[in-house]
Amino acid sequence: MGATVSTLAYLVSSVLFILALRGLSHPETSRQGNLFGMVGMGIAILATLLRPGMGGGGIAIVLAGLAIGGTIGTVVAGRIQMTALPQLVAAFHSLVGMAAVFVAAAAFYAPASFGIGTPGHIHAGSLVEMSLGLAIGAVTFSGSVIAFAKLDGRMSGAPILFPNQHKLNLALGILMLVLIIAFVATGNSLLFWLIALLAFVLGFLLIIPIGGADMPVVVSMLNSYSGWAAAGIGFTVGNILLVVTGALVGASGAILSYIMCKGMNRSIINVLLGGFGTTGGGEAGPGAGNGDRAPVKAGSPEDAAYIMKNSQKIIIVPGYGMAVAQAQQVLREMGDLLKKEGVEVSYAIHPVAGRMPGHMNVLLAEANVPYDEVKELEEINPEFAEADVAFVIGANDVTNPAAKTDKSSAIYGMPILDVERAKTVFFIKRGMASGYAGVDNELFFRPNTMMLFGDAKKVTQEIVQALQR
């Protein structure tokens, strides 16, 4: 009876997780999606605690783990800045990967507890599932650690390349397959740990050649890896909810990676093997880096306020610079003032703006920007030609016309926001340094562009003050 109730509870949780993913697909329903996910997880935990054979000791251990993990998670979530959310996600992915490694080890050394055989006589099918979960989990852990270090600035965001790198990765991949086959055939403990060690090394080698410009895709891809690792271990331990949840995370992460790659006009293989993207270096001073190009026009917040106040249509383009400056609240205040003057205001979101999928959407939602004013690339691009002003706040690579004109550019072919088609472009930036892809932005030198040099939040606050006069 208890097993049947647990199975039904797991089914309800699975449905709630599916509804959570559906809700998270749109900003308007994202809160509801989060609620579905939390309720589903609560039901899953309760069902696990009530499973036959848990016993008082097992329940106590699980509750202790929940208390420790919940406390750490609450403290971290309360302290984390929105700009650090991408590296936090990468760090959490690493924990999921390591959890898969630990569960695989537990199943290998105590198979009777999971009903998959006895030590030295584990079912062949379980060994296959175990080895795959182990390998994917270890790759996810070390890959996520490198992604965290790059995103958090603890190591260079530039691609780290060395001769015959891809050949080495291919050789290690083939060796991994050979080890898994040998492990399934023999169940040898040495092979188990060799698979884990090799997977840790492979995860490290797969991520270090990937540059900063591709990090949004990497975060999404590692999310997919963590899901498949969980699904593989779910098969091993015979937990249907872990299988379903892992498959949902794995599939949704893979789909999101595809969408992100499409937004960059790149293939998954290109991301894994290409390695373009740098940190963009430090911020050069105003006017630096223009070489033989036309001089850059620098303006003041008062100039921007006057022109925008007398405009009919303005499109705001947020980017990572807005996130760093935490300028979303004052940006929404600026938009509200302009709307009171009868100006039509909308926000343009590029699929890879920021350092993780949906980064800009989350920040604008936090500032209570109306959802109907936030538009994706395909929807907003035709409107730039009708706009009096394109107001770019901290976005760089996603607005660079070189993606359409310069075949030698690292970002050539990437769909961009067509901000250069607006009558006037205001570009808030600290200096003239290139973006995360390490490519100079041609937009800075266009005759209809006016640079507003300074901190994004401070400059926007000064524009707000000028609008209020």
Image (tube, grey):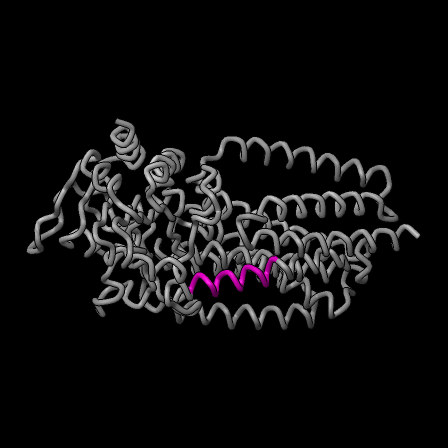
Q: Residue at x 86, y 41 (%)?
A: 55
**In the figure, is residue 219 to the left or right of 137?**
left
Farthest residue, direction right? 1
Camera-nearest residue between 118 and 56: 56
Is 336 colored magenta in this rendering? no
Residue placed furthest toward the front: 342
Q: Is 323 in front, or is 217?
A: 323
Residue 406, visible in the rendered structure = yes
In the rendered image of this protein, does residue 168 appear above or below residue 67?
A: below
For the question of whether residue 101 can be seen, the reply is no
Compared with 85, 13 (above or below) is: below
Residue at horizontal 76 percent and vertical 59 percent from the top: 240
Report x, y in % for residue 269.
42, 70
- All told, the count of numbered labels is 0
Residue drawn at (21%, 41%), measured in percent from left and top? 307
Residue furthest left in the image:
292
Q: Provide residue 464's location: percent of width, then percent of height.
A: 30, 31
Closest to the observer, 334 or 157 = 334
Q: Quadrant of residue 169?
A: bottom left
Front-lying residue, 390 or 37? 390
Q: Is 425 left or right of 315, judged from the image as shown? A: left
> Magenta includes 258?
yes
Write down the region rendered in magenta.
Answer: 249-261
Residue 138: which quarter of the image? bottom right
